[in-house]
Image (cartoon, coloured by chain):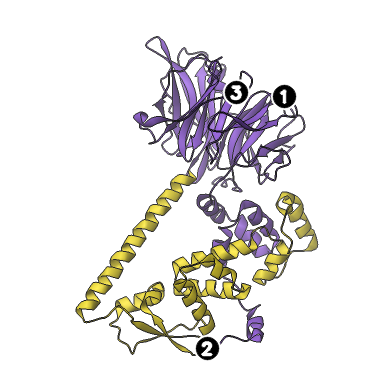
Amino acid sequence: MAERGESSEAVMLKKTEEEKLRKGKMIVGDESKAGYEEEGKKVKLVTSDGVTMEVEISIVKEMEIIQTFIGATDTDDSFIFPISNVSSHILNQIIELVKGEYDQELAKKLSHDELKEILVAANYLNMKTLFHFIATAIANVIQNKSVEFVRDFFGIVNDFTEEEEAELRKTNAWAFEGVDED
Amino acid sequence: MKKHSDGEVKKSKSVVLLPQDVIMEILLKLNVKSVVRFKSLSKSWLSLISDSRFRNLYFDRSSPTEKLLIISIRVLDLTVPSIDFNAPLNRDSYSYFEFEVPGEVFQPGIFKFGGCCRGFVLLDCLEHLCLWNPRTGFHKKVCRPPIDSNKELSRNLLFQGLGYDPLTDDYLVIQLFASITIYLQTHAKVFSIRANKWMENESTDLFFTYSQDYDTPCRVVNHVIHWLSSCLKEEIIVGFILAFDVAKRKFFEIASPIVFGDGMDEMRVLSEIEGLLSLNVYTNSKLSIDIWVMKEYRVECSWSKSIAVSLVDHVPQKFFFPVCVTKDGDIVGNDLCGLFKFNNKGQLKEMLSYQDVSAHLHVEMYQESFLSLPCPND
């Protein structure tokens, strides 16, 4: 059953990839007619801390939220996209991760806050590959960790009463065995 | 680009709060144990994890944790041991776990095992049926179907099983009976969890004959429930696979890749290998195990023998059932004394002997989940 579900998901993924490819080709095709040079092309992004950064088109292409703008408008070099939810620091991290082809080793160097901020940014910019990459990295950090560790990780306040929490721990006692040291 | 100073990073610590749908994506990538533990993080995490939408998504997305349940038909101590058959067969192993059977549902006594589906186990207790999720402890009693005294005096249960219909997100218990009063007739009854009642269902016109396979339970693959069975066709007893499509609520037949041999010499088990229906056969006189896999579902010519081994150094007792195949291609099965794992050369790799040899034991492949049943419709 699950295998079947997975395979249909895989098929869907393949489809969207194909669509992306087609879309990519279309853009290249249309733009090249208008004398558009794909290679080395950069797009200006303004970050939340007011920094204007020139980002390579290959990276911007993964940001579906901006891609829809590029598709809809005639872009020229003067066009500037504000990304008000992403700081320059985080955008730099994103660029490094995309350029590094999503190497898990790179993710290990990120702080917990960076991981969370990149995830929020990936969600906002609609960068699907980056989103799943970082979500997996966070899952790897918190897998087998204690409840206290994970509360601290996400900045979550415990709103259970002592009795409620004790009851939950009692009914799910098996899930608390063999947990990693914090 | 200038890096943030440490002070700024620290300041942002409590600021980065992730939206719930983002949290959910992270949770979907965790193992069952971590997800269950994190229910006690906060009230909002508890409600997110308890939500049926999340549970269904989790079940569909996660790679299944498959285990063997070792069910003693005569439960004395109200525990059911389980073990991850891909891990070493060892009682000290991390993967070995004993589930506690909820005492208010099962009176200690004899019960029959009726099948597994998405982490739920169907148990046939003396007075009622019960759906039980060993991982969450969730259980629901189901009364036996009522007898229509105009049509029947009593009846024989031939097959029963548990299945899931993804279209209606409903679980069905199916029972097929042989009528005692009307010769050759069978009839089927289906219990829908959503409708919370038994309904008559279209039956089959097959005439079933007795076979020891009736003691082997159903196997759910592709939302279809399968049973090994034998019927009388043109005065010859033919072994085949009876199937029930849960969504269409219809029976159909699948031909077996082999002619069924003597039931005292040949142990047959319906199983599943990487989502494919398989027929595992142990022949006692030849000490051989054959694993047949149906490569393309319902295409009978696609049955192919994927594993054929002869046991070399260890001979199990006469009644050996090859229950499943591990990811590494090892064969795991049980006899009256314990669980055995053989490699593809027929050598014994590991064994786990049962503590209580006298108990009648049944070993079943079970996919762990923390799903709960849908609520009955009003």
Residue underneath mark 3: B320
Image mark for residue B359: 1
Query: Disc 2: which chain?
Result: A
Residue placed furthest toward the top: B235
Q: CA distance from mark 3 to mark 1?
A: 16 Å
Instruction: Reply above or below: B103 against B44.
Output: above
What element does badge 3 sit on?
loop
Residue underneath mark 2: A49
Instruction: Specify whether disc 2 shares its chain with disc 1.
Output: no
Quarter residue A54 falls in: bottom left
Circle 1: residue type:
Ala
Query: Disc 1: which chain?
Result: B
Instruction: Reply above or below: A48 against A156.
Output: below
Circle 3: residue type:
Phe
Mark 3 or mark 1, which has the lower sequence index? 3
Residue A148, percent across and down? 73, 65
Instruction: Reply above or below: A2 against B51.
Output: above
Residue at coordinates 74% horizontally, 37% vertically from top-left?
Answer: B104
Residue B177, percent across and down? 52, 22
Q: Which chain is yellow?
A: A
Quarter residue B119 falls in: top right
Pick the front one: B277 or B147 = B277
Circle 2: residue type:
Asp
Instruction: Specify whether disc 3 shares its chain with disc 1.
Output: yes
Residue at coordinates 41% horizontally, 82% vertically from top-left?
Answer: A55
Residue A167, percent across and down? 77, 54
